Image (tube, rainbow, N blue to C red):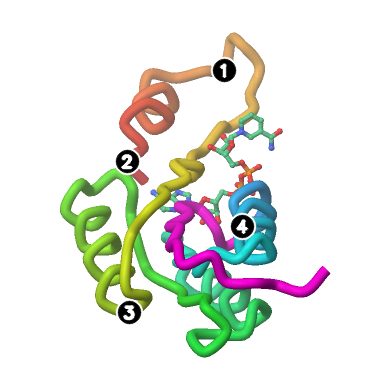
């Protein structure tokens, strides 16, 4: 089905891979302009390029969701570059897998506070 712009802008945190990438691709196919926001700018850029880049309604942004100002900055950039801000997908996160007796305070703080 051909993509038809719906006039809305979505910002997806952690959009550089995995679930965030899949959400970004689906929203883009549904007509959203998408801001692919990720700690890893390289993967975010690859996803944005795959979706046609700025002319195709997809940009990459660097964001660190553990830093409030960084998130506000990413939103401002999405507005400046894509002309609006309608939807945010708060997807970015980490979920380390480890046996119960190997979980550390540092690991819990990293997951909850998301400080890398
Ligand atoms: N995959 C699963 O089965 C599953 C299940 C339950 C919950 N989740 C959660 O869903 C989210 C996405 O899962 P996934 O499997 O796609 O993860 P993933 O590890 O494949 O992708 C996470 C993305 O988030 C980015 N990221 C990490 N820290 C960031 C930060 N501080 N700021 C901005 N971006 C950051 C990474 O660079 C990466 O691109 C995660 O929060 C994960 O914990 C995943």
Viewer-closest of 110 and 44: 44
Q: Give the residues in magenta.
A: 1-17
Question: Which-is-in-front pick, marks 2 and 1?
Answer: 2
Q: Quadrant of residue 99?
A: top right
Circle 1/circle 4 CB separation < 8 Å: no
Query: Judging from the image, what secondary structure is the residue with disc 2 in?
Result: loop
Q: Position of residue 82 (x, y in %)?
A: 37, 75
Q: Is residue 17 above or below residue 79?
A: above
Label disc, if present, on residue 115 of the rendered structure = 2
Disc 3 target residue: 81
Q: Report the front residue among 17 and 27.
A: 27
In percent of the image, x 22 and y 65: which residue is there? 76
**Residue 65, x across and y down, in percent:** 33, 47
Quarter occupied by the N terminus: bottom right
Q: Is mark 2 in CB contact (under 8 Å) with mark 3?
A: no
Q: CA distance from mark 1 to mark 3?
A: 45 Å
Q: Earlier in the sequence, mark 4 or mark 3?
A: 4
Mark 3 lies on a secondary structure that is helix
Give the distance between the C-alpha atoms of the residues marked 2 and 1, in whole angstroms.
19 Å
- Report how far apart the C-alphas of labels 4 and 2 lie in the structure: 28 Å
Q: Which residue is mark 4?
A: 27
Q: Is residue 102 left or right of residue 90?
A: right
Where residue 90 sits, quadrant-wise, is: top left
Mark 2 neighbour density, 10 Å: few (under 14) some (14–19) many (20 or more): few
Ligand 1 within 8 Å of the CB at mark 1: no
Q: Position of residue 112 (x, y in %)?
A: 37, 26
In the image, residue 18 above or below residue 28:
above
Element type where label 1 sits in the image:
helix
Name the residue beneath numbered marker 1: 102
Tell me which label, 4 or 2, sits earlier in the chain: 4
């Amino acid at each position: 089905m051909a993509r038809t712009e719906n006039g809305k802008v979505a910002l997806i945190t952690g959009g550089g891979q995995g679930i965030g990438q899949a959400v970004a691709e689906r929203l883009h196919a549904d007509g959203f302009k998408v801001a692919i926001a990720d700690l890893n700018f390289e993967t975010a850029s690859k996803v944005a390029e795959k979706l046609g880049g700025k002319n195709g309604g997809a940009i990459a942004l660097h964001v660190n969701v553990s830093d409030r100002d960084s998130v506000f900055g990413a939103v401002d950039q999405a507005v400046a570059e894509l002309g609006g801000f309608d939807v945010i997908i708060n997807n970015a996160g980490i979920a380390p897998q480890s046996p119960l007796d190997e979980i550390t305070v540092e690991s819990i703080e990293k997951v909850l506070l998301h400080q890398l």
